[in-house]
Image (cartoon, rainbow, N blue to C red):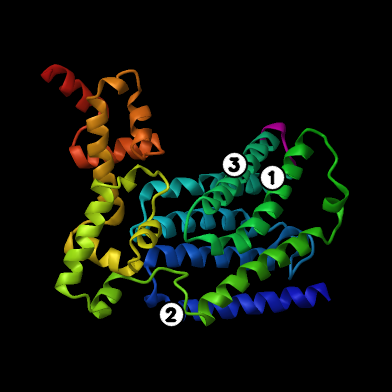
Amino acid sequence: MLRTIQIIAILQGLFLILVLLKNKKKYKSTTFWLFFGSIASVLLYLIGDDGSNIFKKGADWFLFDSSLFVTFLLLFLKYFKSGSDKFSKKDYLFFIPNIIFFSIEATEIILKKETVFIEIVELLIAITFLMYVIYIVYDVINTKGMKWVLYFVIPIGLIKSYMYVVDSLAFFGIAKMRMSNNEDFNKYLLLIIAFLFYFVIYNLITKPIEFLPKPTLNKYKTSGLKPELIKKYEGDLIQLMEEDKLFLDPKLSIVTVSEKLNIPRQYISEVLNLHMNISFQDFVNNYRVNEFIKYLQKDQYAHYTLFGIANEVGFNSKSSFNATFKKIKGVTPTEFKQTLVKNS
């Protein structure tokens, strides 16, 4: 019976992939392919998981591991939240744990044994993916406009966390819990993941919700925004930053701004990208950088580190702050501070 349900889930997944591919031009490229990667990785997991391989019992098809799903989902949520349609090369780094894991698994097959070094690396990789899952759940809970994600992130997060914790405990010689020793446990896990995820995709296809962002240009051609409305929206956005200082919120997203101003998200994107010639993220970061410079010259922040000040103005990542500051000002924050000291 379980095998029948598994086959049905696989067929359902294949059908949904075909439907999405047929309609891919309707969506933003980056978020679409990250979302597609999440679906495809779940489908591969359904087909070739070691514990429930559909073709060969007990097959060691490590490339079908579910860890790819976690990485794709993390990146999908990141780009859905930012609204960016250009994939950053540095985000390929998120796949490094997957590459290491696949390399370790391949090595095990060649050597036909596990070494202590391999076991330690596998433990570190399991902890890394556990951190990914925890971050996904935390980020979704704390981001407005993404509560729909909770319907599948929370169950999947609990399942994946349980699996990684069990694997980590096994490294220290702690016996697996009885439930995890059940030969059908992995099958039930993959079916739960599959049906939860496919349920969300089904709603994406059957309901007119903005589950995947649509291409900006396609929307702009048919938006019909009048010049006076464009000018009003520009003023509202500037006021929101200059007077309300909404950019100080490190969790600020285009969804939050849309809700705050009661302006459709696509109109905000249009006004920024077409009429103000700037992306949402750059628009917000410009205000953050300028505010950082103001704080840097105040005596009350003299004892703060550079990132301490950056954190006060809305940056929550040191590397992102440094890269953004140099992009906008042409120098690093440290170089900028040294120039201020010399001039004073």
State yes or no: residue 115 in magenta.
yes
Residue marked by disc 3: 128
Q: Which mark is residue 127?
A: none
Point out the frontmost of discs 1 and 3. 3
Residue 332 visible (yes or no): no
Residue marked by disc 1: 108
Q: Earlier in the sequence, mark 3 or mark 2?
A: 2
Look at the numbered disc 1 and give the secondary structure of its residue: helix
Q: Classify 10 Å Cα crowding around label 3: few (below 14), some (14-19), many (20 and above).
A: some
Q: How far apart in space, not on screen, are marks 1 and 3 (Cα)?
A: 20 Å
Furthest toward the left, the residue is 343
Q: How far apart in space, not on screen, are marks 3 and 2 (Cα)?
A: 34 Å
Q: Nearer the viewer, residue 292 or 279?
A: 292
Q: Nearer the viewer, residue 298 or 133?
A: 298
Q: How far apart in space, not on screen, are marks 1 and 2 (Cα)?
A: 41 Å
Look at the numbered disc 2 and give the secondary structure of its residue: loop
The stretch of residues the image draws in magenta is 113-117
The amino acid beneath tag 2 is: Asn
Residue 330 percent location from the top left of the image:
18, 37
Q: Residue at x 75, y 41 (%)?
A: 113
Instruction: Indicate whether 307 appears above or below 14.
Output: above
Look at the numbered disc 3 and give the secondary structure of its residue: helix
Q: Earlier in the sequence, mark 1 or mark 3?
A: 1
